[in-house]
Amino acid sequence: MADSETLKYGLAVLLFVGWTFQWNVHLLAILYGKWRLYRQRQVGVEEALSGISILKPLVGVDPHLYENLETFFNLDYPLYELIFCIEEEIDPAVMVVRSLLEKYPKVDAKLFIDLYQKQDVTYIIKTEIGAKRVGVNPKVNNMLQGYEAANYELILISDCGLRMNRDTLKCMALALRENVGLVHQMPFVCDREGFAAVLEKVYFGTQHAKIYLTADLLGINCVTGMSCLFRRSVLDEAGGLKSLGQYLAEDYYLGKIFFDKGWKTSICSQPAWQNPGTYSVANFQARMTRWVKLRSAVQPFIVLMEPISEWLILGLIMSWAVTVIFDWSPVAFFFVHTLVWFLLDYILLRIVQNGPLPFTKTEYVIGWLFRECTSFYLLLRAHSSPILTWRSKHYLVKSSAQAEEIHIRSIV
């Protein structure tokens, strides 16, 4: 009997230590975000901005694609090239890119469609159908020809759904100091209308920002591939872009290469502004499920850690723990835990937003509760099957985020 009481008390103390750690993560993210985000730095007299090759992998068209891509033609940066990579010539994104090439003839921009390079001052056509396959990752396959044709040492990979401020590229380049090999942007979202837009902004400005900012502060690999600027020579020493084709989580392994070679990574002071024209709650949840699968494949211990990093699960188990340790009221504790967590999330969201929120406090409450209360369901859904769906393709996820493409009919 005494042994069971000791075990129960020990478990409660362990949970209390974990709960305290989560609060420290919350506070560190707020303090670091306030200090790090939106800091402006001017180019020094002794500093020279190097040329940058921007890779834009594209698949399909959404209502905001044209305006998002157009922001890359108007960057305040002295020397850069745009390389658009599209797998098939029948993709409607081809027409969008060509119209921008015609509108901005003075911008150094090229379009890669398939495999063979044809000399043309406006765009590059490649004759074989489909991108060159070097692995299971379709994004890497799509970008490979553009990567090999890039003219500059610095490479920026930028997803199709992003828009960029005029000074963002300069901001990223200035963060690429002597000991920094890779600069990435913390994902966030543009102001849009609808509940799905509120949900995305709440997630990326609270739970995701909390982990992302703290990881960057502590020097933990948290690189996301939607917008990252890196030194090409470092990646080439490790086998080049094609070496990442075997992984679906190519961004994690890209960051790992730089860490393993002794380089630091750093976030840009400006977040990555996601601005897809098509969005919904179902799309958001599918994306979260896919990310959970990849995180769990890369770092298996996350399967146990993620549930207790969320407000609801952590609050419930801690309400039990404090009754064992301190004999406190579990209801009162859960109420205080919820209120403080909610307020700290709101403070962090305002810091990441860097201005007034585009929705009411009531909408924030609803969006926050919905996201928090469905997070455990999404974790269960992610772990219920090893099959990952990315766009229209399906993959069987293995360890280290390696995978093989499958056809659903073959497993039914």
Image (cartoon, rainbow, N blue to C red):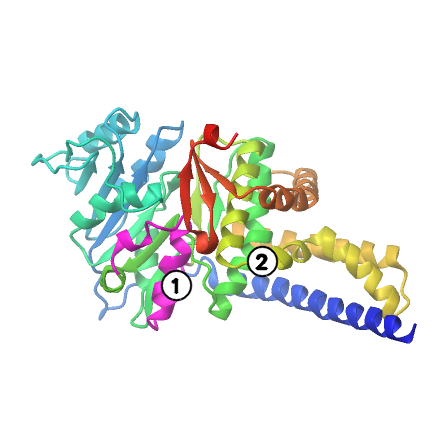
Badge 2 density bin: few <14, some 14–19, many ≥20, Cα 10 Å: some
Q: Secondary structure at mark 2?
A: helix
Q: Give the left or right position of residue 66, taking residue 401 as reference.
A: left
**Percent position of residue 3, x then y:** 87, 75
Residue 347, relative to residue 287: is it above or below?
A: below
**Percent position of residue 102, x then y:** 18, 30
The stretch in magenta equals 239-268
> In which image quadrant can residue 382 be found?
top right
Name the residue: 70% across, 53% down: 311
Q: Nearer the viewer, residue 92 or 79?
A: 92
Q: Amino acid at mark 1?
A: Lys
Q: Give the left or right position of residue 290, taking residue 249 as reference.
A: right
Q: Nearer the viewer, residue 304 or 84?
A: 304
Q: Residue furthest left?
A: 119
Res. 358 in view: no
Name the residue: 39% across, 65% down: 265
> In which image quadrant can residue 359 be found?
top right
**Percent position of residue 338, x then y:** 76, 53
Q: Give the left or right position of residue 251, taking residue 311 as reference.
A: left
Query: Which residue is under mark 2?
Result: 302
Q: Nearer the viewer, residue 147 or 106?
A: 147
Q: Nearer the viewer, residue 82 or 59?
A: 59
> What mark, if any, has residue 256 been given in the picture?
1
Q: Earlier in the sequence, mark 2 or mark 1?
A: 1
